[in-house]
Each structure stands twice: as C-alpha cells, then as structure tokens.
C-alpha cells in the first residue's frame, strides 16, 4: 500500500487546576527525542483560563521514530486500536488516538476514552486518497513497526 504520514500532532489541554510542567512531562512520555511544545492560551466553556500544548512532528525521520516508539509504548493496546480503527479516522484522513494524561504523567501509556486525554493525531496520505486505502494504510501502520 502506498501511503505516508504527513504529520503527527500531540496535544493536551492544561486546565487552571493543573501544572503546565506536569502536563508537558506527560506529553514527553510519548517521545523518544527532544521536541518543542507550542503553548496557546485559551478559555474554557465557562470562561476559565486554560492552555493548549501542542507538538507538531513534520520531519519524516522524526515521524518514523515517533511512530515506532509510540507503537512500542502501546504494546498489546494496538489490538484495541485495530478493533475500532475505522471510527478513529475522520473525514480529513486524520487518525485519532487518545492517551490517558494522568497515567502518562506516571510513565504509563494507556488508551483513554475519557474526557481529558493527550490527543495524538496522525495525518495519513494515500494514493489514491480513498477511504478504503486510508483505513488499509492505518492498519498497515499499526501492524508493522
């Protein structure tokens, strides 16, 4: 299958009750290399102050390194991702994986289905750009490391 990962974005929200450094450490659990976190100020639903942390990976070598390491961290949870892979890919061909932010801070990588995760978004590109090709490529990415 011909395809590539165009970019990977790893992001998390820092609520006013949280420490930005700790959320940054949680994100760092997912990385095998140095990276820069972009910080954006935001307001919550009720006007509460919060920050949005994001790391964007675009260099092909870094994308490969991150993905390989991320799959190792996920271990057997990759089977869970494969089980509902079609639901994880949106209309823009972005593959979504959510990681438990609190567990990541403690050095443990667990999938999250709750409300306050670290979001890992993977932009997939295939030729042709048909949904079946994208889903097939995503499956391939999860089964080869």
Image (cartoon, rainbow, N blue to C red):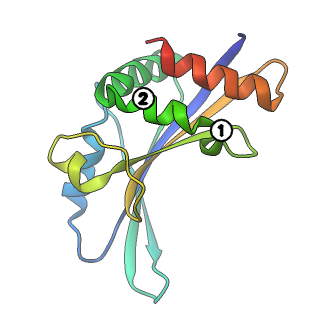
Placement of 105 over or under 71, stated as above or below: below
Q: CB atoms at circles 1 and 2 under 8 Å apart?
A: no
Quarter of the picture holding the C terminus: top left
Q: Secondary structure at mark 2?
A: helix
For residue 52, above or below residue 109: below
Q: Which residue is mark 2?
A: 78
Q: Is residue 118 visible to us here?
A: yes
Considering the numbered disc 1 on the image, is that residue within a helix, a strand or a loop? helix
Residue at (49%, 83%) from the top-left corner? 45
Viewer-side residue, 112 vs 125: 112
| Frontmost residue, 30 versus 58 | 30
Instruction: Look at the picture and state if 88 lies above or below 13.
Output: above
Give the residue displayed 47% in from the left and 15% down from the top. Answer: 61
Q: Return the residue found at the far left.
A: 106
Q: Residue lying at the far bottom in this picture: please name it.
A: 46
The residue wearing badge 1 is 86
Q: Calculate the distance from the C-alpha at mark 1 to the C-alpha at mark 2.
A: 14 Å
Q: Where residue 40 sits: x, y (%)?
A: 44, 63
Q: Residues within 10 Å of mark 1 (few under 14, many from 20)?
A: some
- On the image, which quarter does residue 27 sit in? top left
Horizontally, residue 15 falls left or right of residue 44, namely: left
Give coordinates of residue 53: x percent, y percent: 39, 55
């Amino acid at each position: 299958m011909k395809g590539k990962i165009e970019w990977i974005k790893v992001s998390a929200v820092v609520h006013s009750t949280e420490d930005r450094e700790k959320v940054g450490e949680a994100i760092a659990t997912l990385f095998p290399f140095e990276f820069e976190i972009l910080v954006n100020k935001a307001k919550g639903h009720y006007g509460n102050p919060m920050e949005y942390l994001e790391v964007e990976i675009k260099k092909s070598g870094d994308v490969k390194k991150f993905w390989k390491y991320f799959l190792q961290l996920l271990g057997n949870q990759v089977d869970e991702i494969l089980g509902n892979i079609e639901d994880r890919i949106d209309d823009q061909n972005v593959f979504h994986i959510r990681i438990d932010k609190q567990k990541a801070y403690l050095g443990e990588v667990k999938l999250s289905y709750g409300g306050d995760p670290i979001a890992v978004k993977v932009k997939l590109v295939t030729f042709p750009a048909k949904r079946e090709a994208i889903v097939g490529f995503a499956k391939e990415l999860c089964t080869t490391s």
